[in-house]
């Protein structure tokens, strides 16, 4: 079902400038906000225009990455609330807020589908953000290095680094077919650690307890949308049957909690509540059929605000 789904994971290394960096404890929103503004500055040819009214919107990198819209006349997934962006920023999970001059800050960037071709725009945007400044006082930094990562083996390879700072040909593109269940033995248990605030909806309400069928519903929604809008491919699967099977998988241990968190949205000029579930859950049941979805979901995240690192989970272990 997922053979055509592809992604690449990168490690991005920044170096704090002469005045250091001051960032909030959760850095995902700050990275996303500053990066988005920088991307628009370097990509937009008509900065005083509104994207939806711009004559260049069908060929604009910024519109594709940040303002993806359905194709005219398109019927598939037309009722989706929003189209997911084809990238994910995974911030460092520590709560460190002050970085001294020359100190490194490393985070992950994951590009999905067609967005893999746009890596040079991401690099130039990070460099632009470094000149413009980020965090409290908009302090400058330098883009020091980018490494591609094989998520399955942990192997890394520098693709953008001194002295030449040119993008080197690189590998480590993975597809949905790379996610196998062979690492698990056979008793039907699976433990998932929700590492960052995870906001999943069921029946139009955000849930404080992530039942297995709710996780699968949200994963199917996100993966099918990323496939359609960023791979030009519609997943063919019996979603209703999968959800019915998922409803039979039960929670046998729940060590999660709800964590409140707010971010400021400059677009809406207001503070937005983005709290979510964190912690470990162990599920038990017939889970083998769902493992490719769950293993892929570790890298594309699930739920609201995935683009700046929310909904990040990790499969801790399991037994089929």
Image (cartoon, rainbow, N blue to C red):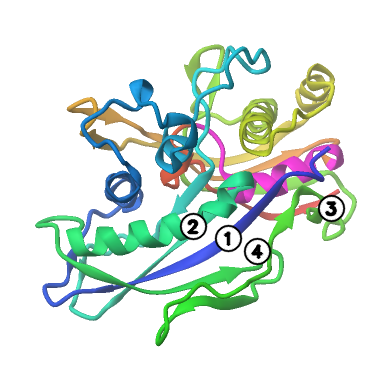
N-terminal of the pair, mark 3 or mark 2, is 2
Residue under pointer 1: 9
Q: Residue at x 76, y 48 (%)?
A: 176
Q: Does residue 295 appear to the left or right of 177 in the view shown? A: left
* Magenta region: 288-303
The CA span between labels 1 and 3 is: 21 Å
Give the SS element for disc 4. Answer: loop
Q: Does residue 50 appear to the left or right of 312 in the view shown? A: left
N-terminal of the pair, mark 2 or mark 4, is 2
The CA span between labels 3 and 2 is: 25 Å
Q: Is residue 293 magenta?
A: yes
In front: label 2 or label 4: 2
| Residue 271 in view of the camera | yes
Asked whether disc 2 touches disc 1, contact meaning CB atoms under 8 Å apart, the reply is: yes
Q: Residue at x 68, y 17 (%)?
A: 76
Residue under pointer 3: 181
N-terminal of the pair, mark 4 or mark 3, is 4
In the displayed image of the protein, which residue is found farthest to the right?
Answer: 186
* Residue 126 percent coordinates (x, y): 34, 60
Residue under pointer 2: 109
Image quarter hosting the N terminus? top right
Asked whether disc 1 touches disc 4, contact meaning CB atoms under 8 Å apart, the reply is: yes
Q: Residue at x 23, y 69 (%)?
A: 141
Residue under pointer 4: 151
Q: Residue at x 64, y 15 (%)?
A: 74
């Amino acid at each position: 079902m997922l053979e055509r789904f592809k992604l690449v994971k990168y490690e991005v290394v920044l170096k704090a400038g002469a005045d250091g960096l001051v960032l909030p404890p959760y850095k995902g929103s700050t990275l996303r906000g500053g990066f988005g503004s920088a991307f628009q500055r370097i990509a937009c040819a008509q900065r005083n225009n509104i994207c939806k009214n711009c004559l260049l919107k069908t060929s604009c990198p910024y519109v594709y990455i940040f303002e993806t819209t359905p194709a005219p006349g398109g019927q598939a997934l037309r009722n989706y609330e929003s189209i997911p962006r084809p990238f994910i920023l995974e911030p460092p999970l520590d709560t460190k807020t002050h970085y001294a001059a020359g100190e490194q800050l490393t985070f992950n960037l994951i590009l999905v589908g067609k967005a893999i071709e746009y890596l040079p725009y991401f690099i130039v945007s990070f460099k632009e953000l470094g000149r413009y400044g980020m965090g409290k006082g908009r302090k400058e930094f330098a883009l020091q290095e980018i490494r591609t990562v094989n998520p399955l083996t942990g192997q890394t390879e520098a693709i953008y680094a001194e002295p030449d700072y040119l993008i080197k040909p690189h590998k480590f593109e993975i597809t949905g077919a790379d996610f196998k269940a062979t690492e698990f033995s056979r008793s039907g248990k699976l433990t998932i650690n929700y590492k960052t605030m995870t906001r999943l909806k069921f029946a139009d309400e955000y849930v404080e307890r992530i039942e297995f069928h709710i996780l699968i519903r949200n994963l199917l929604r996100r993966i099918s949308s990323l496939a359609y809008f960023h791979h030009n491919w519609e997943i063919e699967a019996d979603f209703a049957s999968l959800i019915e099977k998922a409803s039979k998988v039960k929670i046998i241990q729940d060590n999660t909690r709800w964590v409140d968190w707010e971010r400021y949205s400059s677009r809406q000029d207001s503070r937005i509540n983005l709290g979510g579930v964190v912690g470990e859950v162990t599920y038990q049941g017939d889970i083998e059929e769902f493992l490719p979805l769950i293993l892929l979901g570790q890298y594309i995240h699930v739920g609201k605000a995935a683009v700046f690192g929310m909904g990040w989970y990790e499969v801790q272990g399991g037994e089929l």
